[in-house]
Amino acid sequence: MSEDHKVGLARAIRLPHATAMVVGTIIGTAIFVQPSEVTGQVPSLTGAALVWLVAGGLTLIGALVTAELASTFPESGGVYAFLRESFGGWLGFLWGWAMFWTMHSGIIAAIGMVFAFYVGFLVELGPVGTRAVAISTILAISAVNYFGVKQGSDLQAAFTLIKVLAIVLIVALGFSLGESPVVAGAAGLAGAADLAGETAASGGGLLGGGTFSDFLMALVAGLFAFGGWHMVTYNAEETVDPTKTIPSALAWGVATVTVCYVALNAVYFYVLPLETVIASDRVAADAAEMVFGYAGGVAMTGLVMFSAFGALAGIVLSGPRVYYAMARDGMLFKWVAELHPRYHTPHRAIVLQALWASVLVGTGTYRALFTRVVYTEWIFFGLMAIGLFILRRRPGVTRDYSAWGYPWAPALFAIAAFAIVLNQVINDPVESALGLGMVAVGYPVYRFWAKPDRILPETAA
């Protein structure tokens, strides 16, 4: 065993930090952008509300499933470890493979792009400047995490606390501030009512003329806003008492996010006409500008940038722990599993992630990135829920936490996950083929790597 492996990961993440990781990772930039994506697919108040309700419900069920699995296998890697134990190393490897090339790095790239777009609202940036800002931000946060999990988790906790307080302030002021917001809100509601009336008169119904397929596409946008709920499990070996801390952090974190999202959407629809919500590419800033004037739009832009930075802190922190776990299992180059002798971090995995996410910034668009992330992830989430059934029936497998609603809730979760993926394949077969092809390529790579001489001594048994 190398000296790097003797170092070991440092247990420095307690319940407040873990909860902050859940909240801060989920509340990134999407809630300040995705309401327009959702409402564009289902142009009605009731349809949009239903999308957010279903997205939140699926997230909660997924978090509960993940909490049980985390209490069963409290080790670094999270979903990678759960799939490995349920189905075998091949599926765990495909998750990690897709994480690096598409899912996790894609989230980092997408949020980095949104951060840069909002910087461009304050300071004029061309296409090259926008990408340069996004890449610089990713590299800066990666550097912080390179120097220690305590530094990374403290940064995440601080950013999370401030942005949750900011959201509370925005909601309170949005509904209570003087005559002008009330008048604007009334106009917004009237405009929404007019549009809803026109929709109903034309037979649009609950989804504003959208189909069930449109609803599922809107759900993809909503689920991206809730994305990241599972990432706290990646750091199980750096978490104090993980079998209790991680389930509690998931429950408290998802509940906090759901309240924040419902409140923010209520404010958006209160102060803006529905057609404005649909057309806006910065709906949060538009809502703030309606209530507070131009200065409010600038302030909201600052909050989005702050939130993006905080979300990146958590996402950059969590991903390398999966690549570390895979390399420790002999599924990647052994040097990826080496820990920094001083900082106790998987420093090489952090560098690899930062470099590839930077490449994606230069090659992808925001919509393509978030769509590919969601439908790829949810293939594995559906399989993870099925894995829960397998593990419940496996002799000798114990758990410290049991998911609520078993077996109906996990079954519903799996069915919804596969419906989302199937709908994406039907609606965009070319893009789906590219994304799923990237995942499929991982299988022959796994067959190459899964050789006894590549398994590290401490995991060979």
Image (cartoon, rainbow, N blue to C red):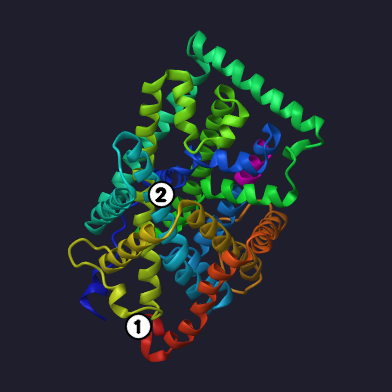
* Secondary structure mostly taken by the magenta-highlighted segment of the chain: helix
| Identity of the residue drawn at 59% across and 54% down | 62
Which is more toward the observer, 254 or 316?
316
Q: Is residue 118 left or right of residue 63?
A: left
The three-letter code of the residue at mark 1 reads: Leu
As drawn, 103 above or below 90: above
Quarter assignment of residue 239: bottom left
| Identity of the residue drawn at 40% across and 43% down | 20
Q: Is residue 379 left or right of residue 50?
A: left
Membership of 41 in magenta stretch = no
Q: Which residues are magenta?
A: 49-57
Q: Is residue 240 visible?
A: no
| Identity of the residue drawn at 75% across and 32% down | 199
SS at mark 2?
A: helix
The three-letter code of the residue at mark 2 reads: Ile
Look at the image and tell me in which quarter the C terminus lies.
bottom left
Quarter assignment of residue 276: top right
Question: Which residue, given by chain and number where applicable, does mark 2 sit on?
Answer: 111
